[in-house]
Image (cartoon, rainbow, N blue to C red):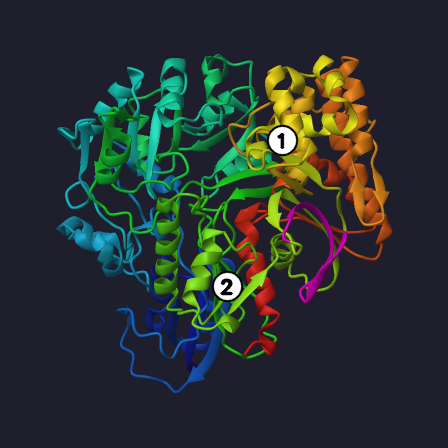
Amino acid sequence: MTERQHHHYILTGKVQGVGFRPWVFQQAQQLALVGSVYNAGQAVVLHLQGLESRLTEFQQRLQHQLSPQAQIEQMTQTVLPLADFKDFQILPSQSAESVTNTLEIPVDLALCDACLAEFNDPNNRRYHDPFISCSDCGPRYSMLRAMPYDRANTAMADFALCKPCQQDYQDSHNRRFHTQGICCPDCGPELVYYDAQQRLVSKGLAAIQQVANRLQQAGLVAFKGIGGFHLMADATQTAAVQALRERKRRPAKPFAILCRDLEMAQQLAELSAHEIQLLCSLAHPIVLVKRRQDTALAQSLSNAVAPGLTHIGLFLAYTPLQHLLFESVTVPLVATSANLSGEPILTDAKMIFQKLARNDAPVVDGVLDFNREIINPCDDSVVQSVLGKTVTLRMARGLAPFPLSFAAKNHQAWSFLAVGAQQKSTVVIGRNQQLLMSPEVGDLHSLAAQQRFSDQISRISELTSIEPTHWVSDQHPSYASSKWAQKQTDAEPSLYRVQHHYAHLLACMAEHGLTQPVLGFSWDGSGYGLDKTIWGGEVLLASVQGFERLWHLRPTLLLGGEKAIRQPRRIALAWLFERYALETVLEMTSPTVKAFSELEIRQLYQLYQKPLNCLATSSMGRIWDGVASLMGLNQQLDYEGQSGLLMAELYDFSVKEAYDFKINRDQIDLNPMIEQLCRDQQAALSQSKMVSRFINMQIHLVAYLAKQKPDLPVVISGGVFQNKVLLQQLIKYFKNQSQPLYFQQHTPLNDGGIALGQAWWFLHQTPSIK
């Protein structure tokens, strides 16, 4: 007879909030095993006792039959003496003091197909249940107060289970066995709809019909979601979309479009197999895709959704509440974050009324709310597909908190916090070689955003039970994140600063586990340089130990300082002043010159000559903006990255010519490109050819400099490389080269990745840190 054994497991990874304990219970029942399973901190502890052959079968199932949501990162297994187990039980969560934790927090998951089928079944008890979920789907992080992930530690603790839900929760054969977020219309949150004057209009399912009616009348509604409110409008009614732009003061930045299902999305956009995979993934992120023009639905879509662009951001309904709305609405909907410009997403109706329903500046006409608290705000994630590779632009709902773990090289259990940059703020908390990356908060220019930044740090610290003793920040002294980190330190040695563009490269190195020297191209809008000037077009020899600035763009002048960042025409005008006499500039037919009055040009020329209120920058992002002005594409930015999006629309893959550049020692001189571009513009060359030659120049530049260091892998990071055309052309080029090309896929290559780079640097300095 096969010997009976008692196996003890400690499992870490994605093992909470994913139905792992119920799955273990069901396997134990099937295999006639006894013992127990329970949560402990961020781990799961398992005792299994039975025949050795059955225990072996369990291990096989553990490796090959877990749900897609679950993922085991680490497992320790020991054999213990036989115990007096009578059956198998799911026990209450216990203290994590004796358990080795990884940093893993369950993320919010889109409604699963099984729940959607029940939602659509008139004979099912959960038909049109606005909060239907199961162990495979539903909110997790956004309603989590503490770990472990138990109902008592979530916003659902406020809702006592009705008898049928309690029976489902306790039934080991039920899909909702031990589902922590279980509820139904009888015991779950209540829907309410208010008008803009905060008057209660309706409750329950009638509230959804009120939303539908308002949207059909070209109204704007604040609609509560998983991690915050959306502002919704009918995407086919230009009057509604324009009203949203005017009220939110967002003149041109594209809006995301919420679709009922994949079929609707396919009517709106040309979708590759990989883009479909992204849309339907567990996170249901916003995916940037190419708009169709050959279907009635695509033609009905308002051009005001994404002015001047043929690419749009689509995502599929991911909550039962959104699916319920689409029962009464048959058109795609604009669904953008409910906030004031520059502030984070709003999460409660009180703040919606204070900020978006004021009598003097109303944004919304109605508010759909429910009484389940959003504890951890989380915006929608944004991704794009580049040659079948995922590129993450905003890491938030469904993708974050994002855990990373690395093989330990030392045993010093340092706890630390990397606070990131000023824009697209994320933080990374760490303990030894375990890291957890937060969802993106947004830019930290407003007091509201800075408060959200501070609150998120507190929440991440509480959820991971980590109190940092070391902090890592950007070198920019005026960043809100840098100032915050400075305030936390009792002594300067506990605060470490990492140069911005070096951190960009380190983030990519972290994702790919690179520590050796690399040739790094770090191109973005701006970052604080070691010489206290504005960097942004950097080519660095980088490793985890430090970096050397090999090449950088020849500095260009920002006429009027930061005003030039918002007005690319000022950048281009400085280029013209550098090449031509004032009177010659005034006589030019350049789009840049036409964007100013004669008086403005003369006044700016005086600034240029002295120079007064002018900044020098080596930023590649500013080069894109200046070129967009010279081509007549854009003279004033309405949103970050606008120049790049407009150029990507015009790129012609058949054009092989490229503008020229020069390498003067450590400087990359783009004057040849600017002179050729000016000639092409005066000769009325098409914008498409000029754009193509400009982007091709950057491909040639990267290729040329890479050949100067043929033994080094190439790493690219920074917001400029978000440009889909630029990135895919680089991927194609290096596919045929011996040098490997590394770029980020799972973490943002914009400033949202800076905190990860800071953390990667810190991990490799800890032996020398006191």
Quarter residue 244 falls in: top left
Q: Residues within 10 Å of mark 2 (few under 14, many from 20)?
A: many
Could you tell me which quadrant the N terminus lies in? bottom left
**Amino acid type of disc 1?**
Gly
| Residue occupying the point 55% across, 28% down | 637
Q: Is residue 210 magenta?
A: no
Give the alpha-carbon distance from disc 1 to disc 2, as whole Å.
Answer: 32 Å
Is 545 magenta? The answer is yes
Expressed as whole percent of the image width and height from the top left, the position of residue 93 reads: 29, 69
Q: Which mark is residue 644?
A: 1
Q: Which part of the image, by quadrant, shows the C terminus?
A: bottom right
Report the predominant secondary structure element of the magenta stretch. Answer: strand
- Helix, strand or loop at disc 1? helix
Q: Which residues are magenta?
A: 532-550
List the residue tagged with mark 2: 435
Which residue is at a point 49% across and 27% down the rendered structure image? 254
Please, what is the three-letter code of the amino acid marked with disc 2? Leu
